[in-house]
Image (tube, rainbow, N blue to C red):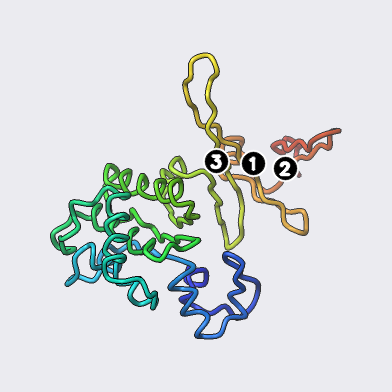
Amino acid sequence: MNILAGLDTPTAGAARVAGRDLLAMAAKDRLAYRREVVGFVWQQTSRNLLPYLTAAQNIALPMQLSGRRSGRRAKAERALELLELLDVADCRDRRPREMSGGQQQRVAIGVALANAPAVLLADEPTGELDSHTAEQVFAAFRTANERLGTTIVIVTHDQAVASEVRRTVAIRDGRTSTEVLRRSQVDATTGHETVVAREYAMLDRAGRLQLPAEYTETLNMRDRVALELESDHIGVWPDDSEQG
């Protein structure tokens, strides 16, 4: 996340965000990238907001630092628009200590969105919040995605977060292991909307894949599995052979 956010400089490999090559950036380019291309929300609410500024002032600050020529009134209007969008307009004149944790995180999302970034990165953004408050924060992320078109990338260890997003990529032992895609499906007869999820295992260049742990544990798969090539798929079965 630090590399994607432009906070750490990669030394090898490839890293591209919104068409920018992070390995080829000079220090000046990296600063502009952090101010204009990506937004960032930390897990710790205290890291996201300056304690001596109000919610509106915190959101206006990134616009001032970016060097944009828009006047004070335009910045204030943009800050209020974001506060209203994220349902925390009533916190406009409050400082962080006067807001709940959930309100602080929603204002922090506003700070991250101030300069209209292409990508918003969030590191365990609900780690300090209860489940009800976390739902409000995820609703704010969805609003930013749907209304502003901002791509949201969330890193978390909380499995419950999976149901809140459209795409989940799992990393195990430093490698991408599985990917789950979700889409809404509406019944033409009843009008009832359901979410359909499909899970994929990632295949590396050597043809290796990581099966989801819940699958292998359910079928008691260990050490080795039996494979069977069919015309349109590969069967994977628990090893039932006798081993001497």
Disc number lying in front (1 or 3): 3
Q: Position of residue 151 (x, y in %)?
A: 50, 55
Tag 3 secondary structure: helix
**Viewer-side residue, 131 vs 28:** 28
Report which residue position mark 2 lands on: 225
Tags 3 and 2 touching, CB below 8 Å: no
Q: Quadrant of residue 78?
A: bottom left
Q: Quadrant of residue 218?
A: top right
Dot 3, how many residues are within 10 Å of its Cα: few (below 14), some (14-19), or many (20+)?
A: few
The C terminus: image quadrant: top right
Tags 1 and 2 touching, CB below 8 Å: yes
Instruction: Tell me: residue 196, above or below residue 124.
Output: above
Q: Amino acid at mark 2?
A: Val
Q: Amino acid at mark 1?
A: Met
Q: CA distance from mark 1 to mark 2?
A: 7 Å
Q: CA distance from mark 1 to mark 3?
A: 10 Å
**Disc nearer the start of the sequence (1/3):** 3
Residue found farthest to the top: 189
Report which residue position mark 1 lands on: 221
Report which residue position mark 3 lands on: 214
Tag 2 secondary structure: strand
Residue sitting at x 46%, y 57%: 155
**Disc nearer the start of the sequence (3/2):** 3
**Viewer-side residue, 114 vs 192:** 114
Residue sitting at x 42%, y 65%: 39
Q: Amino acid at mark 3?
A: Glu
Q: Position of residue 45 (x, y in %)?
A: 27, 62
Tag 1 secondary structure: loop
Q: CA distance from mark 3 to mark 2?
A: 15 Å
Dot 2, how many residues are within 10 Å of its Cα: few (below 14), some (14-19), or many (20+)?
A: some
